[in-house]
Image (cartoon, grey):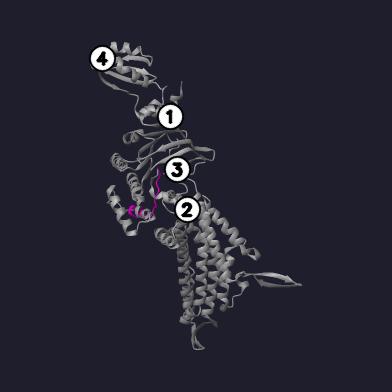
Amino acid sequence: MSIVLEAATRNYGLVQGVSNVSLELGPGITGILGPNGAGKSTLMKLVLGLARPSLGRVRIDGRDPASDWELRSRFGFVPEYDCFYDHMTAREYVAHFLQLQGVAPDEAGERAAALLDDVGLGDAMERRIRTYSRGMRQKAKFARAIAHDPNLLVLDEPFQGTDPTTRRLLMELIRSWADAGRTILLSSHILHDVEALTDRIVFLSGGQVLAVGDRHAIQKLMPHVRQKVRLTPADAGQRPQLARLLLEQPSVEGVSLQRDWVEVDTTDAEAFHRALPPLLRKAKIAIHGIDSPGEDLEALYEKLVGGEQWEA
Amino acid sequence: MGSVGEEVARLLQIGRPVFRDGVRQFLLARSTLIIAALLLTPGLLSGWFWYDSRGKVETQVIAGDEVRVFEGEVLHAVMADLFYGLAFDLYLPLVVALVALLGAAELLNTEFKQKTMQLLRTSPVRMYEILLPKLLAGTLGTFVAVGTPLTVIYLALLAHGGSFGLREHLPLLGAVLGTLLLASLAYTSIFLLINALVQRPLPVSLVYWLVWEVMLASGDSQRFSIMHYLRSFALPRLDYLGIVADDLNLAIESTSGGLTELVSIATDPWQAVGVLLALTTVAMLLSARLLERKQF
């Protein structure tokens, strides 16, 4: 399914949920990242039609999710919060929502049982959900969200409070749904979770989109952010020569010699990486490894949220 | 949108689980069970009377019917008066609204409290497809929660009049249960609307009930209350007991040429049913509209 937000703004009284957000998202997993209060949940509510934009518009496959009730048959939603009927068992809960999708009661019961079995709740499905642990509740929410085989899955902080085993199981499920061509929006403030599932990321902060793309695309959006690049020569004895050559590069701010490698500070990573291959060829220096220790998602996230990319 | 037949079939399919769950939720709610138990207590009057009158009740045959008499009073008539008083002075004006109020909150407000409303709003259903079964569940729940104790009380009281007494006042029981059904429907729809309208429905519902239905439901202004139409529906069915408009607070004083007299302001019973059904329909349409447009 295609998700299009055009300059979407959503205010809650004087509080701004999201501001002037324009995005185009398609099948596969898209991670929505941002600190608490960044606007992740608001963005998801706009996509699901639970909130209407105060300004701008939201379209799912060209249709308005806030008014097109039939479109919702293709939505699966795992909210951040608990959303259960206290008096229901997990099987009744999943079957109840399947019936709202138009599935006959008997078939709904059977499908609910099979799904709950798949997510590891086979033995507990006849127990009331209020007796469940946090991880079991997450599984029950997932089972309900996917029971009707939706095309769009919106997962708001889906791993919150889950143990490692449940987390792994849920991640496998999410990957399998993405492989099946579904569109998945996944929000988290835990970067590792998103990083493990997708490279396609929307960074939100203060209700605004700070960056969109994979980590490399996002890196390009931050030309002024100081980054470290670690070069490990095949011959450690060439480190001083390499350091001198690197210092001559306009994109390099500083170089430090380490025991096995040379660490470069650059404010223009793209220019640096462009200039590096001819430089190494000319000096006949073989490189054993290049990596960027500060370029993981966590570091990018902190730089983006900290506003470092806007500094001249 | 499909044909009317398709829409009805869809409504039945979508509505069934919502209705079934709503009835279960309503009737198993602690508040409903406590109120239903409390409502049975007037039946204890019957036990007390049985103890007090043992050996003193005579049976007389009047016009071929066996009529029981206690200290010169025809028992079935006394008990029918007692039942009428309980039903029309206590249960119908006060208890039904209270039960419907709690029931509507259980049916709709818990959807907000448990945050399941967001799930309903992301399901392919229109809000009236959720509200209508909830209205029916609330109506049935209120009817059963109040109607069962009323029926038990009827049986317990009128049994003192023997089988003749039980048969003789079936129209009274019918009038009470019919009025109760209409009351359950109308009050449930109003309280569902309040639940759709405000975040704290219980105090608002209580204020509506006390100010509108209890305090303003007298004199000419009562035409704006549900209770007026309920009494108007019941009035002709109580005719056989000699009940007149004034007994049901359906009469006002009118002065003409220096002469003051009581004039009935009762609405035609079928018009009263029409008004209550129209009110229910409007309340449901408004509720559905409000829920469709609710932002989260």
- The crowding category of the residue bearing disc 2, from other C-alpha atoms within 10 Å (few below 14, some 14 to 19, many at least 20), is many
Which is in the foreground here, disc 2 or disc 1? 1
| Label placed on residue A285 | 4
> In the image, are marks 1 and 3 on the same chain?
yes
Which is in the foreground here, disc 3 or disc 4? 3
- The crowding category of the residue bearing disc 4, from other C-alpha atoms within 10 Å (few below 14, some 14 to 19, many at least 20), is some
- The crowding category of the residue bearing disc 3, from other C-alpha atoms within 10 Å (few below 14, some 14 to 19, many at least 20), is some
| Label placed on residue A59 | 3
Residue where numbered disc 1 is placed: A305
Tell me the amino acid under the disc marked 1. Val
| Chain identifier of the residue bearing label 3 in the image | A
Whole-angstrom CA distance, mark 2 to mark 4, is 72 Å
Which is in the foreground here, disc 1 or disc 4? 4
Residue where numbered disc 2 is placed: B109
SS at circle 2: helix
Counting residues from the N terminus, which is met first, the one under dot 1 or under dot 3? 3
> Is the residue under label 3 in contact with that under label 1 (CB below 8 Å)?
no
The spot of residue A241 in percent (x, y) is 28, 10
Whole-angstrom CA distance, mark 1 to mark 4, is 38 Å
Tell me the amino acid under the disc marked 2. Asn
> Is the residue under label 1 in contact with that under label 2 (CB below 8 Å)?
no
Tell me the amino acid under the disc marked 3. Arg
| Chain identifier of the residue bearing label 4 in the image | A
Whole-angstrom CA distance, mark 3 to mark 4, is 53 Å
Counting residues from the N terminus, which is met first, the one under dot 3 or under dot 4? 3
The spot of residue A85 in percent (x, y) is 39, 52
- The crowding category of the residue bearing disc 1, from other C-alpha atoms within 10 Å (few below 14, some 14 to 19, many at least 20), is some
Q: Nearer the viewer, residue B234 or A53?
A: A53
